[in-house]
Amino acid sequence: MLNLKGFAIREFMKWRSSQVRDFSIHSCTQQHQILLDLVQSASKTVFGKEHNFSEIKNYQDFKSAVPILEYDELKKYFERTLHGEQNVIWSENIYWFAKSSGTTSDSSKFIPVSKSTLDSGHYKGAFDVMSQFCLNKPNTNVFNGKTLVVSGSQKRHPENQRVRVGDVSSILVYNQPSLADFLRTPAKSISLIEDFEDKLEIVSKKSIAENVTGIAGVPTWNIVLLQKILAETGKNHIGEIWPEMELYIHGGVNFEPHRAMFEKLVPLEQMEYLQVYNASEGFFAFQDRLGADDMLLATNHGVFYEFIHIDQVNDAQPEIFSIDEVQTGQQYALVISTNSGLWRYKIGDTILVTSTQPFRIKVTGRTKFFINAFGEELMVDNTDQAILKASEATKSIVRNYTAGPKYFDESGKGAHEWMIEFAQAPLDLKEFVLILDEQLRKLNSDYDAKRSKDLALTLPIVHSAPQGLFYKWLKSKNKIGAQNKVPTLSNHRVILEELLEII
């Protein structure tokens, strides 16, 4: 039975769901108003003056005044703010920077985070997720207990003690509204422990005594945590510890390859799974329908969206589309302008538009995570789907994978080389490889053409990785943390060679 606190929160969330309906209906109108609000707010900043923001009256003016930008081109403005200068990119003082872990390269990106981005983006988005969930599941008991959230850490910038840098998850925990203390576990002091491995150990012990009804975070690390909790308690599955658990909110990577593992760890009939698109740069989308595989774009959360068609993503002067110009069924690279001072920023994600009324998307991959060594243009969305099909057919469970090219050898043919860490290995790895290859050929015509009669590509080479290999690789890069992950695809062999060396 739902307790009084849980009942009150649930009913409030259901009442608040009208805000979600409002922005989903008026997305185009809201988007153009947000652009004008962003430009007006930043008109007296250094960036705004350099790009004549005071003269911008509409979207066409904005396109003419500001070019499409990547991190390296905005970095000089970010660094000035990092070192204490304000009113450079945004009108508010900025004292938080998210250390981006979208890739695992040695150099990190520092993304500015303003109070507006926290309030009108991340926190508002979290309310939207739970409001819509309560509307879709009106008898939910999720507020009877707490949601388990494992965050990253943050610390003061060595050159400016007023500025803090860290995972966006830690920034959210540090600044979270007081209401969150009643709804989340562990306590803030534990969440912000710097050493991630120590934090997992403490959380696995402390959380056992809580009534956990939900989990949120990146699947990779949540699985590690749940396995630790089972080892700590000696139980067979999480339902024996937290029988009221009913919700997992996930993001950061495609959940489908991890679903089988989660359902094995948490075999509860009442479990629901919701995807969110909550990045270092802002809160962008969330799954607004139970069982759906796409997400509602957050069009009233301080972000103005633009789109580059996937075919032109690497062009010097691509055609840019606003939200009312894109087409259903097409893939685009995402460009954002935000209330933290990211201006026409090519974030590096690719999305598929599944609906325009209301505006829904699927995240299909990264513009830099692909294999195109032989003209095959293999994207993460292809490999995730193929891995899932091969796993289902062979009754196996994949924990992590990465793949890259094996360049032409003496035979004049190349291949894709895979490293796969199984939580439950297939009885016949050769069968798994054949199904994987078959599915990739069905999903990607360019790959199929290169594989035809082994013309350019031979059958994939798949290594079954020893347990813990990917964890060891992340640790060797000092990338153990709530948001870090191994890139699934690379158009080079660097990661593969490093993994092979660890073996």
Image (cartoon, grey):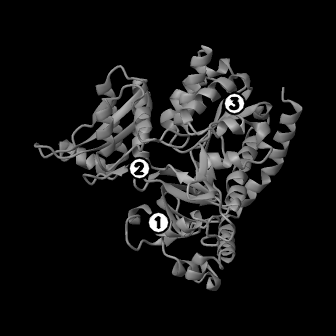
- Which residue is disc 1 drawn over? 70
Residue extending furthest top? 234
In this view of the protein, which residue sits in the foreground, 345 or 310?
345
Q: Characterize the local packing of mark 1: few (<14), some (14-19) or many (20 or more) Cα atoms within 10 angstroms.
A: some
Quarter of the picture holding the C terminus: top left
Answer with left or right where residue 440 lies relative to residue 76.
left
- In percent of the image, x 57 and y 63: which residue is there? 82
Q: Earlier in the sequence, mark 3 or mark 2?
A: 2
Residue with the mark numbered 3: 246
Q: Secondary structure at mark 1?
A: loop
Frontmost of labels 3 and 2 is 2
Alpha carbon separation for disc pair 3 and 1: 40 Å
Q: Tell me what residue is drawn at x 17 percent, y 46 percent.
A: 408
Q: Are marks 3 and 2 in contact (CB under 8 Å)?
A: no
Q: Position of residue 337 (x, y in %)?
A: 58, 67
- Front residue (pair 207, 19): 207
Q: Secondary structure at mark 2?
A: loop
Q: Residues within 10 Å of mark 2 (few under 14, many from 20)?
A: few
459 horizontally vs 190: left or right = left
The residue under the point 42% across, 71% down is 318
Residue shown at 32% from the left, 32% from the top: 502
In the rendered image, which residue does mark 2 sit on? 105
Under mark 3, the amino acid is Glu
| Helix, strand or loop status at disc 3 | loop
Which marked residue is nearer to the observer: mark 3 or mark 1?
1
Asked whether, in this view, residue 432 is left or right of residue 374, the answer is right
Q: Is residue 430 above or below residue 354?
A: above
Outermost residue, left side: 410
- Whether residue 177 is visible, yes or no, is yes
Residue 377: image tag: none
| Residue 288 image position (x, y, % from top left) | 67, 47
